Amino acid sequence: MKNRHHLLNKPIGQIVAEDYRTSEIFKKHNIDFYFEGNRNIQKVADQHKLDLNSLLSEIETILGSEITENICFQTWPLDLLVDYIEKKHHRYIKKKESIIKTQLRNLCTIHGENNPELFLIMDEYNESVNKLSSYMKNEELFLFPTVREMIRAENARVKLTRSMFGSIENPVKKMIEGHKMESLRLKRLEHLTNNYSIPENASVTYITTFKALQEFIGDLKTHIHLENNILFIKIKSLEKQLKDESYILNKN
């Protein structure tokens, strides 16, 4: 009962961060842990009209089962996590964005007259990748290098120098706000595509485009989860630790 009470008050993003296998439960119930991972179990059960005890039981079953294969990003060093996000998820977006743009444009040319929602889907996607390019550029040029500098300061046990941001919470806050805007865009995409449902007798172009788009969004959600629920929390924690240590060094 004590463990269940602890689970009740834990943010769902943290639950997934500690054991990614639980993500399948939230995905099954269409619960957003990527962008809205700060909600607890009680709140999401109320919002989605789910039985609280049943939802808790599902999660407890997963947590109590034997772990055969599970990447625990929560335990990764911060610099490894930054490298992983940049090399896996940023590169994935850069590789796929123009391919899917072309696929959507072709799909609109072939089927747009009878399916005008395809033009809206294309516009939402194009706007999303434009914003993502801006976010990734800011991360790669400013945020991630600052994080690596913080880690070097931690390892060398030296005073944390003041960054161009003042506090690193400032760019992190902007990234979180940007993620919130993207969450609304992804919800619109899911609505416009009917959760990426492929119509009966759909052409090969229709099938390959929707599958590619769904895969792209799936990767993006994992990307956002890693940043919102793990990376940004670790960054703020490290900054606080370094400032506290700097205060002690200066005092002595």
Image (cartoon, rainbow, N blue to C red):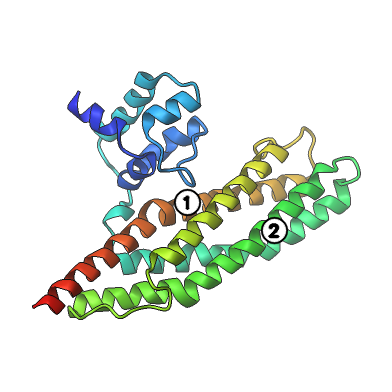
Q: Position of residue 69 (x, y in %)?
A: 31, 46
How many residues crowd around disc 2 within 10 Å: few (fewer than 14), some, or many (20 or more)? few
Q: What residue did someone put label 2 on?
A: 127
Q: What residue did someone put label 1 on?
A: 222
Locate residue 53 relative to residue 245 in the image: left or right: right
Q: Judge whether residue 193 can be spotted in this image.
A: no
Question: Can you say whether 77 is above or below 219 in the image?
Answer: below
Q: Nearer the viewer, residue 77 or 177?
A: 177
The amino acid on which the numbered mark 2 sits, given as a three-letter code, is: Glu
**Sequence-first tag of 1 and 2:** 2
Quadrant for the C terminus in the image: bottom left
Q: Quadrant of residue 53?
A: top left
The amino acid on which the numbered mark 1 sits, given as a three-letter code, is: Thr
Q: Residue at x 38, y 25 (%)?
A: 55
Furthest toward the front, the residue is: 251
Question: Can you say whether 36 is above or below 199 in the image?
Answer: below
Quadrant for the N terminus in the image: top left
Locate residue 195 relative to residue 106 in the image: left or right: left
Q: Position of residue 83 (x, y in %)?
A: 39, 69
Q: Residue at x 41, y 54 (%)?
A: 226
